[in-house]
Image (cartoon, rainbow, N blue to C red):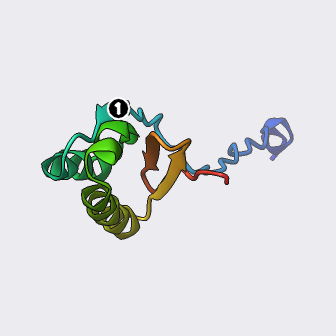
Amino acid sequence: MVFKIFKKKVEKPEYVEIESLPERVRISVKVDVLNELKDVSRLQQLIRNGNIVFTRIKELRKKDINELKRAVDRIKRTCTAVGGDLVGVDEDYLVITPSNVKIVK
């Protein structure tokens, strides 16, 4: 019974589980030109892939303003569908972002 005095009480270490940090996500910024209505499908694909798209619209605006309106409307619908954001910069550019990037206006 004397040996009970010499026994050390070993405590188990406490562990705290933490949530893992999100991995670093690479976001690409693509620069593109909207020359005609058929270019919209390429831009829509870039948006769906999660890219930030900086688009020059000057050429289409000079050529046909109604076609530009249709193109921007299609881009807006895609942007809304993915939860992204769209803003015009000056009269010549559009900036389109995915859902994880918000544009502060």
Q: Residue at x 29, y 35 (%)?
A: 33
Up the image or down, 38 lies above or below 55; here it is below
Q: Residues within 10 Å of mark 1 (few under 14, many from 20)?
A: some
List x then y, in percent, for residue 8.
79, 38
Q: Judge by depth and name the residue closer to the eye, 82 or 105.
A: 105
Say which element carries label 1: strand
Tell me if 103 is positioned left or right of 39 in this view: right
Tell me if 23 is positioned left or right of 17 in this view: left
Q: Residue at x 51, y 49 (%)?
A: 88
Tell me if 27 is positioned left or right of 21 in this view: left
Q: Judge by depth and name the residue closer to the eye, 76 or 52.
A: 76
The residue that label 1 is drawn on is 30
Disc 1 marks a residue whose amino acid type is Lys
Q: Judge by depth and name the residue closer to the eye, 55 or 53.
A: 55
Tell how many labels.
Answer: 1
Up the image or down, 53 lies above or below 78; here it is above
List x then y, in percent, for residue 30.
35, 32
Which quadrant of the rendered structure holds the C terminus?
Answer: bottom right
Q: Residue at x 33, y 66 (%)?
A: 73
Q: Residue at x 42, y 52 (%)?
A: 98
List x then y, in percent, for residue 102.
57, 53
Tell me if 64 is positioned left or right of 10 in this view: left
Q: Judge by depth and name the residue closer to the eye, 4 or 69.
A: 69
Q: Tell me which corner region of the image, top left, top right, bottom left or bottom right, holds residue 26.
A: top left
